[in-house]
Amino acid sequence: MSEHKNNTLTDGNVGKALLIIALPIIISNMLQSVLEVVDMHFIGELGDTSIAGGTLSVSVIMVLTTVLMGIVTATAAFVSRAYGSEKYERIQVVLAHAIYLGLIFSFLLAIVGFFWSEEILFFMSQGDAVIAAEGAKFLRPALMGSFIMMLLMTLTTVFQSTGDSRTPMFVMIGVNIVNIIMNPTLIQGLWIFPAMGLAGSAYASLSSRAVGVILLILCMYFLPKHKNGPIKFPKKFIFEPRLVRDIFVIAIPSAVQSGIRSFAMVLMMVIIAVYGEAAIAAYGMCIRLDMLGLVIAMGLCSGVAVMVGQNLGANKPERAKQSVRYAVTANIIFMLCVAVLYLFTAPVLLGFFGLTGESLAIGISFMQVVPFSYFIIASGMTMGFAMNGAGATRPGMYAAITGQVIVQAGLSAILMMTGHPIEQIWFAIVIGSVVVFLVDLFFYKRGSWMRQKLNLD
């Protein structure tokens, strides 16, 4: 088909193709980072208790939404492979089944969020009822609205996996504008709205993502380049048990991988909580700055996943490997620059986001150590995303178990229980990151991910 002949992701210059797919994703991630900065600033003004409650809530969300993340990863693998092999009719079938599965698991999350948000946070905060009550204001609505988040991620992933990352980028501009406006409006209570505090951040996020879902659906049916394209909902109900099974074969290791990473983060939060509220606030803010620092790396990684999926579908494995080499090199250079930036600006950045006194000192000590492992983290992520894009999600699961749970969390727990200061835990985080990289490198070099089969019939 002519559509395949004009596919720049499977033909032509690899570096240019990677830039075409990755640049809009990077811009979307940077816009999301602007939103994170705004959110962190307004939450920071609420004080250390709100920062700690919000931080713990985000950790819980990351753990409980792992199955949804796995479904999104599997969707990306199937859609990109289908597009690369020109089996366009399968894209809407995969999309429909991803939504079925997402709806089921989102419903379960809504039940957990409605009944047990405060109890979960009470356990995680080492029995601090004040932090638990404050954090539940964010966690409850966030979990109850998880289907909106899942639907936006799924639709975005489908667009990106067919090579169109520009449309989601423009949609995310609208989403971020709405969210940035709604954040101070609902947190502080502007215009006709009451001050909701931490809960306002959750409602602002949900309302803006609902706008994003609506915009993407409109693009599917009314945007000229997609009007007659493969990204659609099926016209009639379709259910294929075998496809559900195949999605789960990829989604479950991905979910376990994501769950283990999130569980390791929760373990780290529990360990950090022993050092007090100031430590929780500092660690939480530094973790969010970690995410900000990795936005460009994440964009390149997402681009690589699409490149790998489409090129394996087009039977071009060497081109898939070449895209990984380009991305690893770019990520190493960029993340070293971020590390240097954080080293010199840590006091200003952390102070801007509301940290003072003891929490500021702890945050600065984090920024003097951990960012210099970013280039290692980004390299491992690139290889992990490449394997995920091929549908080989088990290597990432093994890397997460070994590096983040056994080494990072295990070593941190030992340091905490033996009375070592919190500053030494930062080195445990770096060591864990190195182990994750080495495991990812081992499986990537084996090359079995290039032979991963996906059933598209």
Image: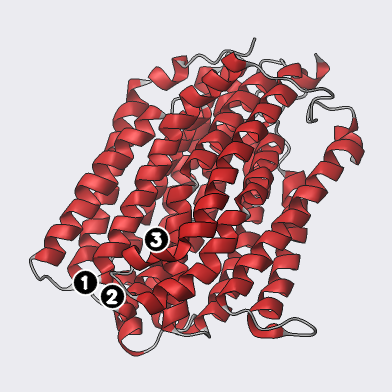
User: Which image quadrant: the N terminus?
Assistant: top right
Residue at image position (29%, 29%) is: 442
Query: Which residue is depicted at the point 70% across and 67% down?
Result: 179
Say which amino acid is labelled 3. Ile
Viewer-proximal residue, 161 or 383? 161
Q: Is residue 405 left or right of residue 100?
A: left
Q: Which residue is mark 1?
A: 423
Instruction: Establish if 324 lies above or below 6.
Output: below
What residue is disc 2 on? 365
* Residue at disc 3, secondary structure: helix
- Total labels: the figure holds 3
Disc 2 on helix, strand or loop?
A: helix
Q: Do callouts 1 and 2 mark residues in contact (Cβ within 8 Å)?
A: yes
From where the camera sits, is residue 364 visible?
Answer: no
The alpha-carbon separation of the residues under discs 3 and 2 comes to 29 Å
Q: Quadrant of residue 210?
A: bottom right
Q: Nearer the viewer, residue 25 or 147?
A: 147
Q: Nearer the viewer, mark 3 or mark 1?
A: 3
**Label 3 to label 1: alpha-carbon separation:** 27 Å
What's the residue at 34%, 82% (across, down)? 359
Counting residues from the start of the chain, the first of labels 3 and 1 encountered is 3
Residue with the mark numbered 3: 120
Quadrant, the C terminus: top right
Identity, as a three-letter code, of the amino acid under mark 1: Glu
Residue at far front of view: 115
Q: Measuring from the top left, give residue 135's x and y in whole percent.
A: 47, 70
* Mark 3 or mark 2: whose residue is earlier in sequence: 3
Q: Position of residue 276 (x, y in %)?
A: 27, 78
